[in-house]
Image: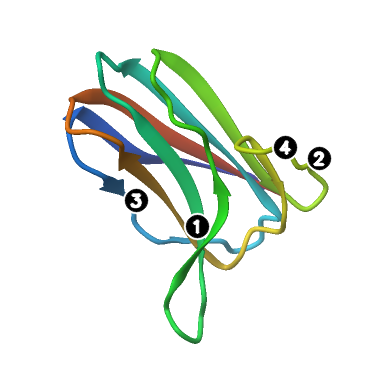
Amino acid sequence: GNQNLTLITATGATTTQTGTDQTNVSGRGLIVVLDMTTVGTGSVTLTIQGKDAASGKYYTLLAGAAVTTNSTNVYTVYPAATASANVAANSPLPRTWRVLVTANNANATTYTVGASVIL
């Protein structure tokens, strides 16, 4: 069935936060939610990455836009998704994936990132 995950909990973060590798057992896609609760003058960009099994290198499945307001942001990677820049990618979820939240400046932000792997 579907799998719900807490990926990153950042409190007063001033640096890039890298989620751990996640193993996709049987999901076709993914919904990721970045809930920015304290942005102040900070800014972050969320990226969903796949991992190449042969080289171990990460590649971008979806890169969001910079988040500069307190807001809830939803990102979708799914083979039947209607592609939309910074929001949705029409792609299957690979076996190994992770989420990266890049700090665009050194100003503190507080947020959580959760995900649901979907069939």
The residue pinned by badge 1 equals 49
For the residues labelled 1 and 3, the Cα–Cα distance comes to 10 Å
Q: Earlier in the sequence, mark 2 or mark 1?
A: 1
At label 1, counting other C-alpha atoms closer than 10 Å, the crowd grade (few under 14, some 14-19, many 20 or more) is many
**111 vs 79: above or below:** above
Nearer to us of marks 1 and 3 is 1
> Residue at 66% across / 55% down in the picture?
27
Q: Amino acid at mark 1?
A: Gln
Q: Amino acid at mark 2?
A: Thr
The residue closer to the viewer here, 38 or 4, is 38
Q: Earlier in the sequence, mark 3 or mark 2?
A: 3
For the residues labelled 2 and 4, the Cα–Cα distance comes to 6 Å
Residues at circles 2 and 4 in contact by the CB criterion of under 8 Å: yes
Measuring from the top left, give residue 13's x and y in whole percent. 19, 32
> Residue at 24% across / 32% down in the picture?
10
Q: Which mark is residue 82?
A: 2
> Residue at 64% across / 58% down in the picture?
93
Q: Amino acid at mark 3?
A: Gly
Q: Amino acid at mark 4?
A: Ser
**Which secondary structure, mark 4?**
loop
> Residue at 51% across / 33% down in the picture?
65
Nearer to us of marks 3 and 2 is 2
The residue pinned by badge 4 equals 84
The residue closer to the viewer here, 35 or 103, is 103
**Which secondary structure, mark 1?**
strand
The answer to whether residue 107 is left or right of residue 37 is left
The residue pinned by badge 3 equals 19
